[in-house]
Image (cartoon, coloured by chain):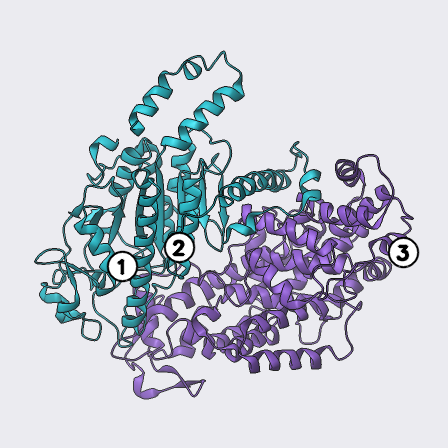
């Protein structure tokens, strides 16, 4: 039975049709089953620090490449050619394989008007798809998207795999987001504290927030712990942190968690000096982690349900600096991977000779990619999430929508 | 008054930071003593609370400002021991040991305010070992946060931005005329002084030119004239042949810098949404009239009626260090002492891996401390502390003895009330009794097992996450 058939069947099933008259929990259960088995999952990988797009998807035929890159010029014979103008970094062999198999879309020249070169501000723009600083303090684009979907019982709608605070992208008004670094951390060992939690919210706003968060924390901890208890299928992942996070994410997807969005961060892309080796290592980790993840999902029969998307807060300046590094720049490519993508190169390659004060000119607004992911993958109306109309980029297969 | 702190600025400016004098509505009581220690330190032990209740707010705040707030469990040779531990951490090249050293300081220093300010500056100048990869440099930077943490801000900012740890962190260790590196210039403006929105992109580029010539040689800061761009630069509308030091002086002088520092201090000391813009402006004005004297501004806040107002009590999410060290001290789980290496691991689980902030912005703090992972970790930490699992080897903590010392006899309800008082200064034991009822039911016997369960439940409860 295909996913569409099953969803259709469930929609028609008497339980759903009679939802107003059947006990509330039964209806919720049926909806939950539908959500878990059929709903698609988005995995976002944040390349933190500003990835050098030029040395990721390399315009090796552009005369500007040799002009602006000396110490940071990659040898053409080691690149993985995509066509007669563009090639992937030597470390990105696994992505080149995905590209050949028709599982990878590369969207070029992505940015937004009046680019901001502050990590914090630009990241906030990408996370919230908002330009007003006051609005950036509120909700993220994925949090807003999850707000529009029915609340998923049994676990948070979004999960960060990794350390640190939740990314602003996941913060919603209603939807809950959780986080973990290792699955074991989520096991509740303090039964006394759990027993002591009252369900009533105190009048005080901050105390209510902490109490509600505590209840959410215990609920999501239990869901994840149950998922982790399933025997592993023996997929082999590299030891790097990103790969380990993706490994855990694969197990959580395999479980029947209702989580729709997973989020992982790969740090270290802020390569102001001695970029060559660092960047090669980062892309190698990224490529091998992604390959292991995709293979694992394939083996588990889950690949159809998963879309992976990478982004970075900005690209880097076209000219290298004196420290064999690059400073904060503007436009950069995004990768989207999975069976649901329309494979190939999308968008227009920015020229390295036609620059805007030393920076690439953007050729595509990132909100068009978001709009596509929202409409064609998460089944959410993009306009309210993005505060305006952005034509969804044709990057996902139409029949998915 | 602390040595070197200038006279508080003119009273006529003090609309929003009127001095606190106890009255019927805001009495100097256990709750406010605990509040003061939670905000300006980690937590006081019961002996210290009783001492401060007797001595009154002036003397108590004097002691905090003078770095003499803690007396319980403070070793006589504290500084000498601390140096030994730091030297050993540096010698081992193991950053985990430096984390343990800092937690030792937080737990045992007589000057908890100094450690809280050091943590504030660690966050403000967020530098990570992940990139610096040098334990000695991380320690040296950390000592600067302590040495100049209460000083006029210029005395802190200059040494910190010229310190090798920062220059390596921001790739500013080889900033040359031909290709200025904008990283330090940008972060200097956005994070260390003005804040975003108070400068333009050309200011960053021009500031980077002013910083050319700064470098690190033999692990020390050097300024190399040959690499310096001697041309004129225009930064924030001011034109001149600026060098790095001129740039720092220029940034220190901007009103936006004072306002940003005022915000930082209010984040440290005041509760969520308790400080309105006019009060921030006034604190910034106070800073500007004292050459950005941090200690003086801290004193202004701590002595204010706004600080002791009901609205400010229990209105702040405790950060990981405040929660962990606060729990150990408030519950006097100091004998035998907890293992600082273990505490350092818990800090990371709670989301604040010392010396390894997530990025140049440090930890966002406030409500972002609260998420699924950190809350489960806080609960599990509470259980571990209750069971004596922070000690190595695991110890049995004398909770029943603690109850008896405080006149709770062997009654579980009374002990729950005591814990609520010690942990969040609870004035009634209603909430504590409800928690006890949910955990132990009608059983009122304070057996060792029941006492452990109560400690785990109350310390893991939502109320104990606020201070």
Do residues under tags 2 and 1 come within 8 Å of each other at their CB atoms?
A: no
Q: Is residue A175 above or below residue B307?
A: above
- Label 2 vs 1, first from the N-terminus: 2
Residue under circle 1?
A315
Q: Nearer the viewer, mark 2 or mark 1?
A: 2
State the CA–CA distance, disc 2 to disc 1.
Answer: 16 Å
Which residue is found at the position 29% from the left and 82% from the top?
Answer: B230
Residue under circle 3?
B405
Quadrant containing the N terminus of chain B is bottom right
Callout 2 secondary element: strand
| Label 1: how many Cα within 10 Å (few below 14, some 14–19, many 20+) | many
Which residue is found at the position 71% from the left and 71% from the top?
Answer: B109
Label 3: chain letter: B
The reply to whether residue A130 is visible in this rendering is no
Q: Residue A34, how many percent across, how many down?
A: 40, 27
Chain painted cyan? A
């Amino acid at each position: 039975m295909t996913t569409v058939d099953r969803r259709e069947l469930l929609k028609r099933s008497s339980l759903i049709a009679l939802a107003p008259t059947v006990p509330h929990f039964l209806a919720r259960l049926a909806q939950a089953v539908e959500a878990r088995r059929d709903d698609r999952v988005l995995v976002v990988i944040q390349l933190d620090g500003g990835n050098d797009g030029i040395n990721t998807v390399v315009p090796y035929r552009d005369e500007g490449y040799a002009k602006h890159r000396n110490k940071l010029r990659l040898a053409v014979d080691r690149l993985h050619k995509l066509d007669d103008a563009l090639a992937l970094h030597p470390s990105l062999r696994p992505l080149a394989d995905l590209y050949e198999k028709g599982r990878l879309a590369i969207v070029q020249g992505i940015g937004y008007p009046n680019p901001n070169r502050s990590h914090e501000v630009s990241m906030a723009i990408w996370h919230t798809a908002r330009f007003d600083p006051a609005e950036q303090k509120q909700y993220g684009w994925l949090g807003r998207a999850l707000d529009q979907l029915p609340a998923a019982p049994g676990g948070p709608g979004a999960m960060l795999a990794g350390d640190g605070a939740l990314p602003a992208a996941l913060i919603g008004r209603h939807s809950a987001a959780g986080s973990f670094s290792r699955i074991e951390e989520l096991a509740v060992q303090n039964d006394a504290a759990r027993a002591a939690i009252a369900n009533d919210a105190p009048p005080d706003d901050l105390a209510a927030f902490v109490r509600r968060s505590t209840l959410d924390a215990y609920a999501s901890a239990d869901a994840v712990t149950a998922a982790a208890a399933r025997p592993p299928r023996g997929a082999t992942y590299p030891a790097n942190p990103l790969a380990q996070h993706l490994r855990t994410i694969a197990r959580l997807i395999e479980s029947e968690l209702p989580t729709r969005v997973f989020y992982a961060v790969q740090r270290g892309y802020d390569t102001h000096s001695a970029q060559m080796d660092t960047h090669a290592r980062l892309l190698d980790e990224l490529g091998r982690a992604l390959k292991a993840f995709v293979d694992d999902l394939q083996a588990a029969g889950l690949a159809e349900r998963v879309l992976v998307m990478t982004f970075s807060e900005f690209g880097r300046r076209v000219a290298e600096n004196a420290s064999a590094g690059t400073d904060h720049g503007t436009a950069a490519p995004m990768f989207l991977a999975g069976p649901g993508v329309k494979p190939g190169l999308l968008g227009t390659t920015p020229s390295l000779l036609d620059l805007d004060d030393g920076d690439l000119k953007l050729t595509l607004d990132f909100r068009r990619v978001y709009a596509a992911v929202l409409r064609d993958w998460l089944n959410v109306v993009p306009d309210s999430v993005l505060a305006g109309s952005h034509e969804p980029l044709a990057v996902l297969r139409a029949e998915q929508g | 008054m602390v040595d070197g702190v200038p006279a508080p600025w003119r009273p006529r400016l003090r609309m929003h930071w009127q001095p606190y004098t106890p009255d019927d509505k805001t009495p100097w009581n256990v709750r406010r003593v605990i509040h003061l220690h939670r905000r300006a330190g980690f937590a006081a032990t019961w002996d210290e609370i009783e001492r401060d209740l007797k001595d009154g707010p002036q003397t108590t705040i004097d002691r905090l400002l003078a770095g003499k707030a803690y007396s319980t469990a403070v070793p006589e040779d504290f500084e000498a021991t601390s140096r030994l531990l730091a030297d050993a951490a540096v010698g081992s090249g193991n950053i985990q040991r430096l984390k343990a050293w800092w937690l030792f300081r937080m737990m045992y220093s007589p000057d908890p305010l100094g450690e809280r300010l050091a943590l504030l500056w660690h966050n403000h100048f967020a530098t990570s070992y992940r990139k610096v990869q040098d334990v000695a440099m991380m320690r040296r930077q950390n000592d600067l946060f302590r040495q100049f943490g209460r000083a006029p801000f210029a005395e802190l900012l200059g040494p910190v931005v010229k310190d090798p740890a920062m220059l390596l962190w921001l790739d500013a260790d080889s900033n040359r005329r031909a290709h200025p590196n904008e990283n330090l210039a940008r972060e200097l403006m956005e994070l260390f002084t003005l804040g975003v929105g108070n400068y333009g992109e050309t200011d960053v580029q021009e500031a980077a030119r002013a910083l050319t010539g700064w470098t690190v040689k033999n692990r020390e800061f050097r300024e190399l004239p040959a690499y310096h761009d001697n041309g004129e630069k225009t930064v924030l509308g001011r034109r001149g042949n600026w060098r790095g030091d001129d740039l720092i002086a220029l940034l220190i002088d901007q009103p936006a810098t004072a306002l940003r520092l005022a915000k930082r201090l209010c984040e440290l000391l005041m509760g969520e949404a308790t400080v309105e813009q006019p009060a921030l402006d006034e604190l910034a004005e106070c800073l500007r009239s004292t050459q950005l004297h941090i200690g003086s501004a801290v004193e202004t806040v701590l002595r204010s009626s706004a600080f002791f107002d009901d609205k400010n009590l229990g209105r702040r999410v405790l950060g990981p260090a405040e929660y962990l060290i606060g729990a150990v001290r408030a519950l006097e789980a100091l004998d035998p002492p907890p293992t600082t290496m273990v505490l350092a691991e818990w800090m990371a689980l709670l989301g604040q891996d010392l010396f390894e902030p997530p990025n140049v912005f440090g930890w966002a703090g406030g409500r972002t401390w609260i998420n699924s992972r950190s809350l489960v970790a806080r609960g599990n930490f509470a259980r571990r502390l209750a069971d004596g699992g922070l000690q190595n080897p695991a110890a049995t903590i004398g909770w029943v003895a603690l109850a008896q010392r405080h006149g709770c006899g062997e009654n579980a309800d009374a002990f729950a009330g005591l814990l609520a008082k010690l942990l969040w200064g609870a004035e009634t034991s209603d909430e504590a009794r409800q928690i006890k009822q949910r955990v132990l039911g009608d059983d009122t016997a304070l057996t060792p097992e029941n006492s452990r369960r109560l400690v785990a439940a109350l310390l893991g409860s939502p109320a104990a996450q606020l201070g």
